Amino acid sequence: MNRTTRLKNLLTRPEISFLCESHNGLSAKIVEEAGFEGIWASGLSLSAALGVRDNNEASWTQVLDVLEFMSDATSIPILLDGDTGYGNFNNMRRLVQKLEQRNVAGVCIEDKLFPKTNSFIRGEAQPLADIDEFCGKIKAGKDTQRDQDFCIVARTEAFIAGWGLTEALKRADAYYKAGADAILVHSKRNTPDEVLQFAREWHFGCPIVIVPTMYYSTPTEVFEQAGISLIIWANHILRAAITNMQRVARRLHQDRTLVDIEEEVVPVKEIFRLQGEAELAQAEKRYLPKSDSRIEVIVLAASKGTRLGTLTDDRPKCMVPVQGVPVLQTLLERFHDHGIKSISVVTGYKPQPVKELGVNTFDNPDWATTGELASLLAASSKLAGAAIISYGDIAFRKYVLTNLLASMAPITIVVDGSGKNFGSHKALDLVEVSQPYQPSGYDIAYKLVRIDPGMPIAEASGEWVGLVKLTDQGTAIFLEAVELLKRKDRDYLKLGIADVLTFIVQSGLSEVAVQYTHGDWLDLDDLQDLVEARGHEIC
């Protein structure tokens, strides 16, 4: 059953029905989850949620935007509090057309003049619309609707304006004959006398709708006995929200701490639940490429860094501060900047300072006698899919990681083609690439030939930065290479990551793609590196 039919059934069934107010997608979902069969999109609440007065200060198109979110978030019918229809008959035609496009089940319009004023503000001073003009608006709406069950509720403000029962009945009779699906009779008294008197005198089969905001203490049984069809709880979700927002805001300002507040508010995970985060997670598994659905980062940070002297007496070199921040922390923040949260760090020498960062860690107790491969295998449980392997003592510009993440090759490494460290005292991971770096060579498919610290400088295309990305396929290839090396070399645990990459290429297991950078990175091997890094904007 579609939403329009369900709203019509709520108006016409023998037992009394209820609508509850909501004013945005979240509150609409809450109302549906509470068990209500329909929603009242209150003009007062919609305006208040937007921070404006209930005087048509929010345009009808702005109201439609909110309604679209409410409709998308729920499956129950929505009845819009459409004020006066936002203009004349032509505006009404346009409104009905747009509401149907957004799957809104009906609209209630009131017989006042545009722009309207809330019924509880100087009601007696508010003029009512001409009966014939208002009837024309109802007819225009009914003629426009394409769904025969779309409901137009006509609201008479005769009691609000102080015109009495006779005028209320006269107007309701005209509106019913013009095609209204129901009559909403409104009163601002704190007793239900006016609406009950109206119900006794109303002899048509047209449903009666009431909004008992002011006469809230009246038992619902009274309305059932009077033959009321539908009750609207018109603004209480918004009012409850305001009460609690004001209370929490005052407490936060006064106490300057969350310690007492946190237990009184819903956990953040409840917001995620209402937003449908679980559905999105399932959709990601279905529609996103598997290799991009999750990527693990493994940072190799087990070494001491003896060339940094006394700076590493009580910490590993990855925790030596540069511009007041450990180089490892800067590296972790770079990954976080790209939305990567699943990060593991392999420790060895003096692991406690790394553990104090709160990051997931694995230990290589044999760090002093083994190589990078042994550290990586200490975190082998994380090598089950797409992964980035990174040295723990490097820093780089944001674009370096952005470009690396965009690579679709099974295995991709980052190479610095600037030659900035060539001829220095440093031990370099020199790289031979299929073609040298070309500033305009964005469309060149650079491939790794070998990584060899001992190769002549003249043969080197650049220096490996210490970053490699593996797709799901790339991880499988990498692990296959490790198994082959294990059988071939009893001392395979002393190998570096560069050794494995070179073996992959030279054994024909796979090509290794190269992404060039041009000097926009640094590493921390010795005191000279530290001096240079402290003035470097990368850090």
Image (cartoon, rainbow, N blue to C red):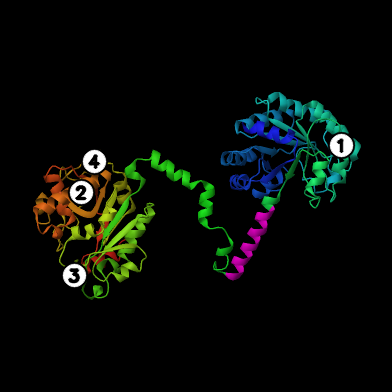
Q: Do the residues labelled 2 and 4 touch (CB within 8 Å)?
A: no
Upstream in sequence: badge 2 or badge 4: 4
User: In the rendered structure, which disc, 2 or 3, sits on the residue that comes first in sequence?
Assistant: 3
The chief SS type of the magenta part is helix
Q: In which quarter of the view is residue 111 placed?
A: top right
The residue carrying mark 4 is 441
Going by the numbered disc 4, the residue's amino acid type is: Gly
N-term-proximal mark, 2 vs 1 = 1
Q: Do the residues labelled 3 and 1 touch (CB within 8 Å)?
A: no
Q: Dot 2: few (<14), some (14–19), or many (≥20) neighbours within 10 Å?
A: many
Estimate the spatial distance between the alpha carbons at disc 1 and disc 4, rounded to whole Å. 80 Å
Residue 197: image x %, image y %?
Answer: 88, 41
Give the Cα distance between marks 3 and 1: 93 Å
| Label 2: element kind | helix
Quarter-of-image position of residue 537:
bottom left
Label drawn at residue 478: 2
- Give whichever of discs 1 and 4 has the lower sequence position: 1
| Number of marks present in the image shown | 4
Amino acid under disc 1: Ala
Q: In this view, does 205 lie above or below 376?
A: above
Q: Which of 158 and 149 is in front in this view?
A: 149
Q: In this view, does 387 lie to the left or right of 481?
A: right
Give me the residue at 80% from left, 46% from top: 221
Residue at x 31%, y 52% (from the top left corner): 296
List the residue tagged with mark 1. Answer: 168
Q: Nearer the viewer, residue 205 or 247?
A: 205
- Compute the Cα span from label 2 to label 1: 82 Å
* 141 in magenta: no
Find out whether residue 247 is within the magenta segment: yes
Span shown in magenta: 239-255
Placement of 141 over or under 309, stated as above or below? above
